[in-house]
Amino acid sequence: MQPESILGPMGALVGLTFLVLLLIPIVRFRAAFAGRVRREDFALGESARVPADVSLPNRNYMNLLELPILCYVLCVVVLVTRKIDVTLLSLSWLYVGIRAIHSAIHILYNNVFHRLAAFATSNVVLIAMWIYFYVVLLRG
């Protein structure tokens, strides 16, 4: 298997992050045009006056810059060490898929229990990826 195949899930995660980033101004401008927020509401980030549905894309974007960084690091390490196999690639795609589900839940209907289930599952997959990588690395 080509080590560059790990760039697929990595690119998909980047794409998801940029998609959510694109939603932030769309949602904010819609809210501003509807008179739901003012420019001053964002002077120091987001004020308490910003409605929850307007702040959700920004919060999800911040989530995509937190734990997923460990996925990016692992993808780069896998690329450099050339330690890629079907299992690690599959886990990587699974992680990205679950993060996409988490983002959809968070932004579209924000059910806390559904979101928590997706978040926790993605974290278990990420931990499994790291453990699996080290097992493969130690085996030589």
Image (spheres, helix red, strand yellow):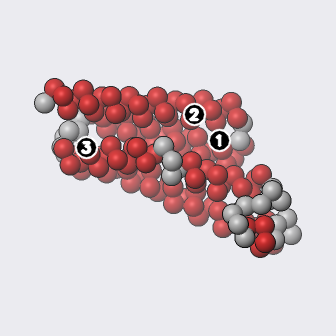
Percent x, y for residue 128? 38, 28
Q: Nearer the viewer, residue 84 or 37?
A: 37
Q: CA distance from mark 2 to mark 1?
A: 9 Å
Viewport quadrant of the C terminus: top left
Give the class, few, some or many, for how many residues have Cα within 10 Å of label 2's Cα (few <14, many ≥20). Answer: many
Q: How many marks?
A: 3
Residue at 26 percent across and 31 percent down: it is: 134
Q: Are marks 2 and 1 in contact (CB under 8 Å)?
A: yes
Type of amino acid at the residue the image marks with label 2? Ala
Q: Which mark is residue 90?
A: none
Label 2 or label 1, whichever comes before in sequence order:
1
Name the residue carrying label 3. 78
Q: Is residue 72 left or right of residue 120?
A: left
- The quarter of the picture where residue 70 lies is top left
Residue depth check, mark 2 versus mark 3: number of the one nearer the observer: 3
| Amino acid bearing label 1 | Ile
Q: State left or right for residue 17 relative to residue 10.
A: right
Give the residue at mark 1: 105
Q: Which amino acid, mark 3?
A: Val
- Could you tell me which residue is drawn at 18 percent across and 44 percent down? 81
Which type of secondary structure does the marked residue at label 3 adopt? helix
Q: Which structural element holds mark 1? A: helix
| Residue at the right extreme of this rendering | 35
Answer with mark 3 or mark 1, whichever residue precedes in sequence: 3
How far apart are the alpha carbons under marks 2 and 3? 25 Å
Rendered view: 3 above or below 87: below
Q: Position of residue 117 (x, y in %)?
A: 60, 29
> For mark 2, what is the residue?
118
* Residue at 51% across, 47% down: 66
- Where is residue 85 drawn, in percent x and y? 23, 35
